[in-house]
Each structure stands twice: as C-alpha cells, then as structure tokens.
C-alpha cells in the first residue's frame, strides 16, 4: 500500500510540473512578438540611448565620488538643485 501511495504522489507531482510547464509555454509571446517588442523599446531610439548612457555615466561618477569620501555625499548633491 505504501508503494502505491508513493507512486501516486510521484505521478501527481510530475503531472503538476508538466501542467505548470505547459501553462508557462502557452503564455510565451513567441519569437516574432519578442522581436516586435524589442524593436519598439525606447532604447532602440539612438537619441534616447545616448541620453541613457549619459545619465548612467553621471550616476557612476557620483558613485565614485561617494566611494572616495567619508562625507555624506547625498547632502552635497541634494543641495545643488
């Protein structure tokens, strides 16, 4: 009886895994839809991409400054507005 119970529980676990995988695959948008989504991202615009790079460079510069000092650097940058 114990072996039958184990077999049924393992079968139920495998069935649950298969059902989860099937539902996950059914929600996948597909290759064509992925390409369309990537094409329409804001970063695909060269102007926006350059703006993002410039902003990331400024943030990295602030982080480097903060790492090199013992002061509260947040107070310094916040007062520049």
Image (cartoon, helix red, strand yellow):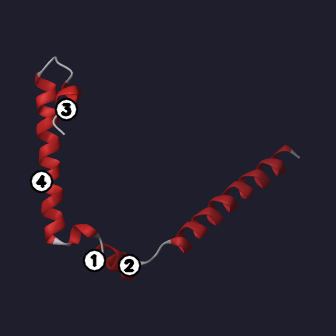
For the point 14% across and 70% down, which residue is it? Answer: 46
- The residue at which mark 1 appears reads as 39
Label 1 SS:
helix
CA gap, disc 2 to disc 3?
48 Å
* Quadrant holding the C terminus: top left
Label 3 SS:
loop
- The residue at which mark 3 appears reads as 79
Residue 8 point in image, percent of width and height: 79, 55
Q: Nearer the viewer, residue 37 or 79?
A: 79
Asked if 81 appears above or below 23 in the picture, the reply is: above
Residue ranking furthest to the top: 70
In the rendered structure, are the residues bearing label 2 and label 1 in contact, judged by CB atoms less than 8 Å apart? no
Give the crowd class for mark 4: few <14, some 14-19, many >=20 residues within 10 Å: few
Checking the image for residue 77, the label placed there is: none
- The residue at which mark 4 appears reads as 54
Give the crowd class for mark 3: few <14, some 14-19, many >=20 residues within 10 Å: few
In the rendered structure, are the residues bearing label 2 and label 4 in contact, judged by CB atoms less than 8 Å apart? no
Give the crowd class for mark 2: few <14, some 14-19, many >=20 residues within 10 Å: few
N-term mark: 2 or 3: 2
CA gap, disc 2 to disc 4?
31 Å
- The residue at which mark 2 appears reads as 31
CA gap, disc 2 to disc 1?
12 Å
């Amino acid at each position: 009886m114990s072996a039958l119970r184990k077999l049924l529980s393992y079968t139920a676990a495998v069935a649950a895994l298969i059902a989860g995988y099937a539902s996950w695959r059914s929600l996948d948008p597909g290759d064509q839809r992925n390409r369309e989504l990537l094409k329409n991202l804001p970063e695909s615009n060269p102007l926006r991409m350059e703006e993002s790079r410039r902003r990331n460079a400024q943030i990295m510069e602030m982080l480097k400054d903060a790492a090199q000092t013992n002061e509260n650097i947040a107070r310094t940058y916040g007062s520049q507005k």
